[in-house]
Image: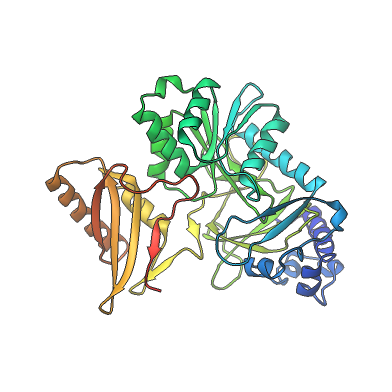
Amino acid sequence: MNMTEETLAGLRKSIAGAMKGGFYRGHFKGIRPEDIQSRADFEKLPFTQKEDLREAYPLGLAAVNEEKIVRIHSSSGTTGTPVIVPYTRRDVEDWAVMFRRCYETAGVTRADRVHITPGYGLWTAGIGFQLGAELLGAMTIPMGPGNTDKQLRMMEDLQSTVLCATSSYALLLAEEIERRGLRDKICLKKSLIGSERWGEKMRKRIANELGVELYDIYGLTEIYGPGIGISCKYECGMHMWTDYLYYEIINPRTEKQAKPGETGELVITTLRKEGAPLIRYRTHDLTRELPGACKCGLDYPRIDTLIGRSDDMVKVRGTLIYPSRIDELLAAIPGVSSEYQIQIDHLNGKDIVNLFFETVLKGRDEMKNLEKTVEDAFKHTIGITVKPIAVAMGELPRSEKKSTRIFDNRY
């Protein structure tokens, strides 16, 4: 991302604000914001890692007096010390403005009825979708997760036109709508999907079975929550709201700036956040910057659809495997559905990889032939031998939140 003098001034201001809090006073010891006079100066600053935020528990990230904190959110992770993120009133208002911009980019208007299924509470998802929709002036239906019977009834009776969900839950709802024959009774036109990476085959299934336009929405609790970027109707990456944040893309191994167009790890610095400003925060999300202007006319730079995380790859027999590569491989094989699960075990001194995948085929001979096709493709494309196991549609678990696709049982 280009760094203008205006951006540089905003970065200095954000650094000064962050250093009012206990964490960054120690993290940036010996550093003065006024010394940051160039992009090179800024890139000498140390990165901020999620583990740093855990060590700041509970309120070490706070950069304002407690009287200015109006809300607390926490990351959705289930392991380790939680990350606590304080918000001021302006933080909440800024977040709502960004989210409203997301809805507008997706073509959502005040005439729409927004059906919100992500979780509420300490997690940022549900309330973020609601804030933006209410600021836009659309009718909001704050369902939260679970209770699929009630979700479908409300969707039908209230004539919801916009579905907000994780890709996993959107797929579950799509399958239930198809199974119950509700397609003609559902009024959905658009769906804003966030919280997890998803492959092209899964995207097409959701779009076709729900009959909707799909939009990728991006965000993370540490940086406001969902709503800091979104795809447009041309489906060519996600526009990032760079009046509220500055981003870099680095090589996760060397920690140097990635070359133009090169895939790397997204690093974000907030420009306006008061409660818990973050400087050079490593998201671990893998993407690349997309050059040029977008046909939609939005004057905001774009990053590509996320391909995974630098910390979710696994190594099997010396080969690195990213979920995105498995998505691409399976998407190219006719008869293979979007849903799969990998189980990695270590038996008798060897790594064993079982790949379960759903298929529309029903005959045992057909399924055996498809398993052989998948085995050969995996060997040729990724370079290791797996044991593919074809199962019927719907046999693999569905999730109301994020789906786990790779289970590494070796450790």
Q: Is residue 100 visible?
A: no
Looking at the image, is 333 positioned above or below residue 344?
A: above
Left or right, residue 406 beside residue 270: left
Q: Is residue 77 left or right of residue 90?
A: left
Residue at 59% over, 55% down: 76
Q: Residue at x 69, y 64 (%)?
A: 280
Asked if 379 appears above or below 271 in the picture, the reply is below
Q: Residue 184 location in percent, x, y?
A: 41, 20
**Which image quadrant: the C terminus?**
bottom left
Q: Position of residue 16 (x, y in %)?
A: 84, 63
Looking at the rendered image, the quarter that the N terminus falls into is bottom right
Residue at horizontal 37 percent and vertical 48 percent from the top? 397
Against 175, residue 7 (above or below) is below
The percent coordinates of residue 292 (x first, y second) are 59, 46
- Determine the image quadrant of residue 105: top right
Closer to the camera, 9 or 90? 90
- The total number of labels drawn is 0
